[in-house]
Each structure stands twice: as C-alpha cells, then as structure tokens.
Image (cartoon, grey):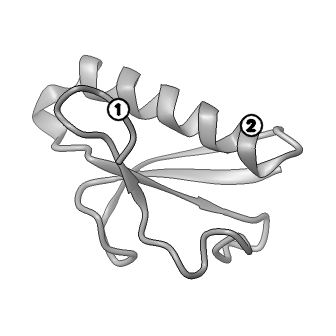
Amino acid sequence: MFKIELTRGLGWNSPALAVILTMERYLGDAEKFARQLLKGYQAENPESGASGYRILDTRGQATEGERNLKPRCLGATGEAV
C-alpha cells in the first residue's frame, strides 16, 4: 500500500493538493496510478496548478526508489518527465 500526494510544484516540500491511499502492491503500479490521477486532477481542476506527485510508503516516508529522485511531473504534452 502506498500514499500518493498530488502536488503543486516539484520539490519535496511542495504543498500536497490531494492525498490518495492506494492498495497497489508494487511501486511500478503505484507510479502508473499516480500518473493517471495527476492527469485527471489537472483536467478537472486546471486552476489548482497541480504539476507533480510523490509516492510515500505507509509510514509517510519516501519509497526506496523515490528517496534520491525528485517528485515526478507531467510536461505540457502529458508525458511523464
């Protein structure tokens, strides 16, 4: 299980606009789900400025694969950057 936070901005200290708990078992599946959530949130709430996401474990810590990475963001074409 992971916690996905949709954020405004790309830093780890960026404010979370939405927090979603997912039952995905694997980080790769959680990443796909996070990208879908972000695209949908951007489409429904364009004024929010949502531009990235971070994936945390159940304790609220960055996942092993995320510790050395910046939160993901979507470019203007909707592709992950």
- Element on which disc 1 rests: loop
- Please determine whether, in this image, residue 56 is positioned above or below residue 41: below
State the residue lying farthest toward the right.
25
State the residue lying farthest toward the left.
47
Residue 49: % across, % down = 16, 43
In the image, taking residue 50 as reference, residue 17 lies left or right, namely: right
Mark 2 or 1, which is nearer the eye?
Answer: 1
Look at 23% across and 39% down and name the residue there.
75
- Which image quadrant for residue 42? top left
Residue 39: % across, % down = 37, 26
- Please determine whether, in this image, residue 23 is positioned above or below residue 58: above
Residue 25: % across, % down = 89, 44
Please state which amino acid type lies under the numbered disc 2.
Asp
- Residues packed near mark 2 inside 10 Å, few (<14), some (14 to 19) or many (20 plus): few
Look at 26% across and 47% down and name the residue there.
51
Residue under label 2? 29
- Distance from label 2 to label 1 (Cα)? 16 Å
- Element on which disc 2 rests: helix
- Which numbered dot is residue 79? 1
- Between 30 and 13, the one lying in front of the other is 30
- Residues packed near mark 1 inside 10 Å, few (<14), some (14 to 19) or many (20 plus): few
